Image: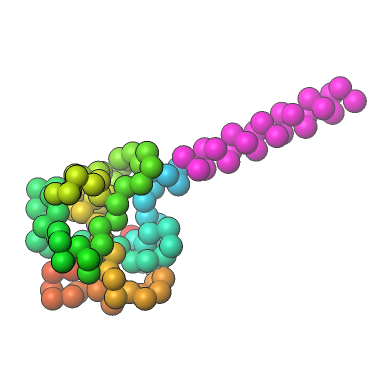
Amino acid sequence: MNTTKRKIGTIAASLFAALALSAVALAQSPAKVAGGVMADSAGMTLYVFDKDAGGKSACNGPCAAIWPPLLVTGDGKASGDWTIISRDDGSKQWAFKGKPVYKYSKDAKAGETTGDGFNGVWHAVKG
């Protein structure tokens, strides 16, 4: 009986550790690939803006209302191609390969890419 309790305790500890590690991995990965493009955790397509340069967002004010930045929440940490930039308002935004990343307010549901190619300067992030 004592051996059985130890095995159950070991299995429970292993499961807890696996869940904790997967939560950390999710917290560090701000996007996933959905249909060949990057998407946020809700499946909304992510975009980059050609006018952004030098790791700085050129989309603020009214622009950011239409193209909301993908903001860093919690204790997000840069990893691999994902970095974190500071916006003009002091908030933190995710950047992919040095380009700040946004969503498009007119994408009504997960998987839509209506902002891709918008005005020739907005592009869906390819996965």
Q: For residue 124, say whether it is visible.
A: no
Q: Is residue 126 left or right of residue 16?
A: left
Q: Is residue 64 left or right of residue 43?
A: left
The spot of residue 35 in percent (x, y) is 40, 69
Say which residue appears at 27% left-offset and 69% top-offset: 104
Looking at the image, the residue that sits furthest to the right is 1
The spot of residue 7 in percent (x, y) is 78, 29
The spot of residue 67 in percent (x, y) is 23, 66
The residue closer to the viewer here, 8 or 75, is 75
The spot of residue 75 in percent (x, y) is 37, 38
Q: Is residue 36 left or right of residue 97?
A: right
Q: For residue 23, say whether it is visible.
A: yes
The residue closer to the viewer here, 60 or 9, is 60
Residue 11 in magenta stretch:
yes
Say which residue appears at 37% left-offset and 76% top-offset: 108
The residue closer to the viewer here, 67 or 17, is 67
Looking at the image, the residue that sits furthest to the top is 2
Residue 38 in magenta stretch:
no
The residue closer to the viewer here, 82 or 58, is 58
Say which residue appears at 37% left-offset and 55% top-offset: 31
The secondary structure that most of the magenta stretch takes on is: helix
Q: Which residues are magenta?
A: 1-24
Query: Which quadrant of the view contains residue 59?
Result: bottom left
Image quadrant occupied by the N terminus: top right
Say which residue appears at 82% left-offset and 27% top-offset: 5
Compared to residue 127, the image places residue 93 above or below, namely above
Image quadrant occupied by the C terminus: bottom left
